[in-house]
Image: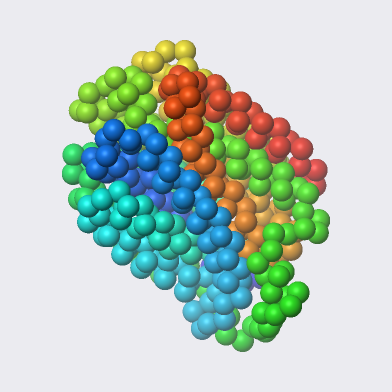
Amino acid sequence: MADAIMNPTQTKKMPKRLAWGLLIGCVSWMGPYSGMNGTLLPAKIGMLDPINKVKLVATFAAIAMIVAMFANLIEGALSDRTRSKFGKRKPWIIGGTIGSVLMFFVLSWSPTIPILLITWTIYQLTLNAIVAPMVAIIADAIDPKYRGTVSSFYGIGMSIGAYGSGVVASQFLSKVNIGIWVFALVQVVLTVIAMFLIKEPSSADEPKVPLKGSELLASFAFPVKNAGDFYLALLGKFLMMVGSYMITGYQLYILTDYMRLSQSTTSRMVAIISMILMVTAIVFGAVSGPLADKIGRLKMPVALATLMIAIAGLFPFFDAAPWTMLVYAVLSGIGNGAYLAVDQALNIAVLPNPKTAAKDLGVMNLSATLGQIMGPVTAGAVISLAGYRLIFPVMAVICIIGCVMIMCIKKVK
């Protein structure tokens, strides 16, 4: 039972089975979400309303942000309080997966923008039922000396999901609905494998705290006590995600409207960019987590990775040519790989209270979710005001501020 979820002090060796389960589990939700958010959803919006597509992408992102803000916090808190023979986390992950797959099929059918928007909104509820509980497994089960390495596995899963999905999605730009069905199938298969690998003990016998009075408020409130470093890490993550997703959320339109590429060339470029991002992120993610454990440093790798992403985003500003997006992909892949490998270990290190791990990590993940959503909103506003070129320096400045926030953390080296 070394791979089973337990108190971190009981972990005697590196839980390889659990680490692989988290990697696959992360791909199971991150891949379909990224494939839809970055490529297939903008493509479908462009098909239904090509004139207003830029504003609509920003509108979808803004509404999704509002829903995710509450869903991540509430579902994470409820996961902490779940008592079942299947554990605290698995019921939420499985339920969220079922809901997400159902919403994907409705998305493929949606014939109008309003129906598409309602479905995308409901999908945010199902998605966040997966995210916060899955990350909390690291806090539940992993001894601090292995958290960098296990976080690296999770980060590699995020890289594969975020960037590998672009390779897949790019093949379905002219067959969007089929692409959505493919992602639904991928999510089901990978979730089944992940749930088989992740062994979670029953939580049925754990004490229940009544949801009333101050306990009710504490269960759903943002942490306050000893939370200064927590919020610095949260802001750093949020700003890094906003910057990154300013480009990711509008990548399709950057290639077609800013760089004036044809649909066939755009399809090839999306696949190449995604492949570069994925390979570089996996390589540097695999190295960064174990290295962080070895040198005993978490803050510096995350800060440097954020700075690398800022530098990467400047290249398309200087030249509206495809080669600049390839350079961006290389540098951003390196930065994202290193960032995602160490980020979750840093998040856990700044938790104010281990007893509310999923709720507080839900708040932390909320910053990532909001950043992913706020990125396209910010980019859409910049494009509307000043065109595509200005989004790149704005993105760089946002990431640099995020880097400064990370470096201000005090209790983590």
Image quadrant in which the N terminus is located? bottom right
Is 331 drawn above or below residue 161 in the view shown? above
User: For residue 399, what is the image quadrant?
Assistant: top right
Q: Residue drawn at (20%, 50%), measured in percent from left and top?
A: 178
Is 270 drawn above or below residue 74 in the view shown? above
Residue 376 seen in this snapshot: yes
Image quadrant in which the C terminus is located? top right
* Residue that lies at the very extreme toward the top in this rendered image: 318
Q: Total label count?
A: 0
User: How is the rendered protein coloured?
Assistant: rainbow
Of 354 and 193, nearer the camera is: 354
Q: Provide residue 246's location: percent of width, then percent of height.
A: 48, 33
Q: Provide residue 78's location: percent of width, then percent of height.
A: 58, 72
Of 311 and 245, nearer the camera is: 245
Q: Residue drawn at (31%, 64%), measured in percent from left and top?
A: 102
Residue 137 seen in this snapshot: no
Is 181 drawn above or below residue 260 in the view shown? below
* Residue that lies at the very extreme toward the bottom in this rendered image: 205
Q: Residue drawn at (49%, 79%), measured in percent from left and top?
A: 86
Q: Tell whether 293 sits left or right of 378.
A: right
Q: Residue drawn at (61%, 71%), measured in percent from left and top?
A: 80
Q: Provide residue 194's location: percent of width, then percent of height.
A: 41, 63
Q: Provide residue 182's location: percent of width, then percent of height.
A: 25, 53
